[in-house]
Amino acid sequence: MNQTSLVFLIFLLLTAGVYLLLGGIVYYHLKTYSLKQDAGQKAKLLFSVGLLLTFGIITLQFFAVDWDQAQATMENVINLNFLRKNYD
Amino acid sequence: MTETSEVCILPFADKDYAFPGQRANEKVLYVIRRHSILLLVPFITLTLFALAPLFLYFFIMPGEIPELTDPALQPLFWLVYTIYCGFLWISGFIVWMDYYLDVWIITPERLIDIEQKGPFSRTVSEVDLRRIQDISSSTHGLWATFFGLGDIHLQTAAEASKFTMESIPCPVRTRRSIIDLVHQAQAQGGVLD
């Protein structure tokens, strides 16, 4: 695990926290205030499934990234931009 | 637009709806929300927000910073983009929830106004149908006339307070239906001051 992956892991955990907070608020409102037998009850299911699916995809993508190669490429990009700026 | 030219039909509550604070044997007659066309602009905006990073990454970046479009960085782009889409998904539902939970419920006895302003502000007020003295409907503007949406103003007896149902579909039909219900309620229980 290199530095870039660690930064992204922390970012991912923060994202999960924010998802949980905002998702919880939306779910609670739809569960509590929707009229019975109305679209809100189905919408909260769609919302939860969508959010869980998104987070599942994010987790899979996190493990799909070749972090060593990604870090090397990003360092290369930063160095290239630094050289370009100095050259200009 | 004349009153008779309005062709839309007021959506009658066809299901056995229930809401918090409902009285025993109180049947929901109408559930009215703002016109759904009002969701169009926020959802188009969210769609543009979803497409903008793809456009930037695949059409602008290759010319400006080609190194960032390196195949080694593409999985990282998709990771960040999916996180971003997750936030858009939540935003979309917050917008829809704001629309959906903002509702007027009409029963044979009363009109309940539930106003949802964002996730943390909710106001519920009600008026007894027997107290209603004056009802007017209005449609202003090109888009409102084109899409058949307008406001209904309800004036209650002996009070300065006024109920307003904003941007609802079929304002004329809705007003007529409410007038009929008010007459029925007053015929059964008398006029309240």
Image (spheres, rainbow, N blue to C red):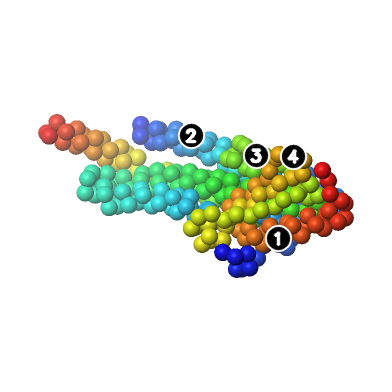
Percent of width and height locating residue A49: 57, 51
Is residue B158 toward the left or the right of residue A85 in the image?
right
Is residue B47 toward the left or the right of residue B165 in the image?
left
Label 1 element class: helix
Density class for disc 1 (Cα within 10 Å; few <14, some 14-19, many ≥20) is some
Label 1 to label 4: alpha-carbon separation? 22 Å
Of circles 3 and 1, the one toward us is 1
Residue at position x 41%, y 48% from top? B49
For residue A31, the mark is: none
Q: Could you tell me if residue B182 is visible in this image?
A: yes
Tally of numbered tags: 4
Residue at mark 3? B122
**Residue B126 lies in what quarter of the image?**
top right
Q: What residue type is labelled 1?
A: Arg
Q: Which amino acid does label 4 sit on?
A: Glu
Is residue A66 toward the left or the right of residue B139 in the image?
left
Is residue B73 toward the left or the right of residue A33 in the image?
left
Of circles 2 and 1, the one toward us is 1
Image mark 2: chain: A
Quadrant into which the N terminus of chain B falls: bottom right
For residue A14, the mark is: 2
For the residues bearing labels 3 and 2, Cβ distance under 8 angstroms: no
Q: Could you tell me if residue A52 is visible in this image?
A: no
Of circles 2 and 4, the one toward us is 4
Residue at mark 4? B159
Of circles 3 and 4, the one toward us is 4
Q: Can you say whether B179 is above or below B20 in the image?
A: below
Label 2 to label 4: alpha-carbon separation? 51 Å
Q: Which amino acid does label 2 sit on?
A: Leu
Of circles 3 and 2, the one toward us is 3
